[in-house]
Image (cartoon, grey):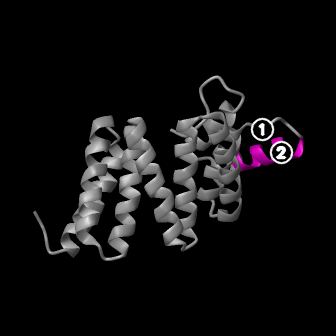
């Protein structure tokens, strides 16, 4: 689900994040940091995900930005997509909608260029949320439909349910119920 390739030194941290044990994951990362354990950009990204789930948005943003920089330098496109999407989520949570929109647009464009269906879905869904909030209902509906198509392709049940729910809300708000 979240970063770090299988078999990497980050696997224990990845397992905690994937099990939604965010407080433990962040504690492990901070222990590694305090003990000068060599930290990979994936460990930073995993800790950023944990921090964001705990509402620690300043820490999440700092870690995600650091990971993004290193992942970009390595040419690690999946990691760049993940970190950019997380930076968008952090910006959104902080109320910086313009920055969030720019980050999510970057995710969607890069994902489409790379043929990454998972982040095409996430980018489109996140942009649709912003379009909906801004009152651009038709744009939101189109983006939700794009996200739903992508989620269906990868059989992401959670993404499918969330997007169908959001799509229904946008259609109701725009007067369309079919």
Left or right: 11 with respect to 27?
A: left
What label sits on residue 133 in the rendered view? none
Q: Around disc 2, counting alpha carbons within 10 Å, would you say few (fewer than 14), some (14 to 19), or many (20 or more)? A: few
Left or right: 93 with respect to 63?
A: left
Q: Around disc 1, counting alpha carbons within 10 Å, would you say few (fewer than 14), some (14 to 19), or many (20 or more)? A: few
Q: Residue at x 19, y 71 (%)?
A: 172
Which residue is denoted by mark 2 in the rendering? 33
Q: CA distance from mark 1 to mark 2?
A: 7 Å
Left or right: 28 with respect to 145?
A: right
Q: Residue at x 30, y 43 (%)?
A: 150
Q: Are marks 1 and 2 in contact (CB under 8 Å)?
A: yes
Does the magenta-highlighted stretch encompass residue 15?
A: no
What label sits on residue 39 in the rendered view? 1
In the rendered image, residue 4, in percent from the top left (x then y), is placed at: 62, 33
Quadrant location of residue 174? bottom left
In the rendered image, residue 69, in percent from the top left (x then y), is placed at: 67, 46
> Which badge, 1 or 2, comes first in the chain's sequence?
2
Stretch of the chain drawn in magenta: 25-35
């Amino acid at each position: 689900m979240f970063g770090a390739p299988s078999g990497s030194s980050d696997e224990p941290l990845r397992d905690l994040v994937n099990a939604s044990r965010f407080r433990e994951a962040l504690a492990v990362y901070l222990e590694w940091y305090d003990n000068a354990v060599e930290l990979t950009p994936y460990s930073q990204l995993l800790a950023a995900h944990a921090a964001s789930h705990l509402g620690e948005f300043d820490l999440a943003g700092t870690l995600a930005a650091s990971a993004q920089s290193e992942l970009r330098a390595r040419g690690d496109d999946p990691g760049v997509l993940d970190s950019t999407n997380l930076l968008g989520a952090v910006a959104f949570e902080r109320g910086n909608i313009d920055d969030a929109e720019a980050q999510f647009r970057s995710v969607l464009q890069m994902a489409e260029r790379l043929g990454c269906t998972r982040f095409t879905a996430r980018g489109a869904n996140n942009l649709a949320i912003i379009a909906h909030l801004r009152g651009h209902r038709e744009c939101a509906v189109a983006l939700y439909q794009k996200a739903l198509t992508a989620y269906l392709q990868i059989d992401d049940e959670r993404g499918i349910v969330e997007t169908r729910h959001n799509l229904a809300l946008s259609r109701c708000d725009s007067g369309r119920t079919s």
